[in-house]
Amino acid sequence: MLTEERRAFLTQRARQARALTLEAIYRVGRGHIGGTMSIAELLIALYDDVMRVDPSNPSWPERDRLVVSKGHAAPIVYAVLAMKGYFDPKLLDTLNANGTTLPSHCDMRKVPGIDMTAGSLGQGLSAAVGMALANQMDHRDSYVYAIVGDGESQEGQVWEAVMLAAQRKLEHLIVFVDDNGCQVDGFTGDILNMRPFDQKYRAFGWHAIYVEDGHSFDQILDAIHQAKQTPDRPHAIILNTVKAKHVPGAENTYQSHCFSLTREQLDNSLRNL
């Protein structure tokens, strides 16, 4: 259980990450707001409380790795990396601009701290499984974390990776499913219902935990702790989240997947934070 002081610190960090992200997307004119806002607490929990990383040495071989398979959430990943000191926060002003080093999807060739280029949905978990398998073969105790979307999970390649991870007992692999109920063109339950995710992962031989409030630092960190106490299998943590969390008028709507913020919406969102 977190202390009140630590919880307040993490909460403030998540607010800062959201604000930086919204401001950057407003400047560029349009962006993936819904799926960035739904993983703010998760990213802060990982980078500020869980992951073993060194911003001064992004390629450190013994580091923990994060694969953001839902690569369109890159803007908030960049914001958190900047907050951690991987690069100058002023670069956030160039998000998705011509010649930028911060493209709209996670790019490991251009951005320090990005462990896997993402964009084609459904592929990131396969890369994460490969990283975890390599660590296992090299007898490293590093963890590999991955974030996949609920709509993305309709891709068959996701479940091929799930099968291999279970077969190889990749206990240092922890996958988070951002279950916000929406995808680009509708509600996931209407298009192709994948719930309940935790039961599906268990059926494939994984240790799975359902987190009722995917924006609660206590619940997120408790689930990660539980996962690390369970040996001989990979772990899936299903986060019940809110699409476009803290953006008034856009929460829990699939239209918030990618849209343009007006100045009024930005100001209201910042006040709401």
Image (tube, rainbow, N blue to C red):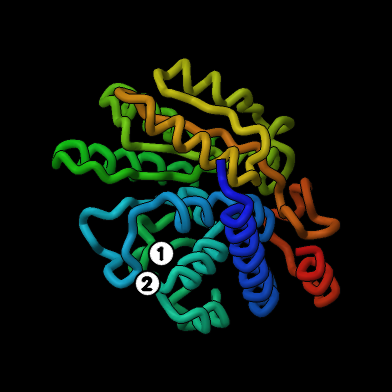
Across and down, in percent, residue 232 comes to: 30, 23
| Amino acid bearing label 2 | Lys
Residue linked to disc 1: 107
Residue 104, compared with residue 202, is above or below; it is: below
| Amino acid bearing label 1 | Asp
Quarter of the figure with residue 25: bottom right
Q: Secondary structure at mark 2?
A: loop
Residue 112, compared with residue 33, is above or below; it is: below
Disc 2 and disc 1 in contact, CB within 8 angstroms: yes
Quarter of the figure with residue 249: bottom right
Q: Residue furthest top?
A: 203
Across and down, in percent, residue 197 comes to: 57, 26
Q: Quadrant of the N terminus?
A: top right
Q: What is the C-alpha distance between the residues marked 2 and 1?
A: 6 Å
Q: Quadrant of the C terminus?
A: bottom right
Residue linked to disc 2: 110
Across and down, in percent, residue 38 comes to: 65, 50
Residue 42, compared with residue 235, is above or below; it is: below
The residue that appears at 36% across and 69% down in the rendered structure is: 112
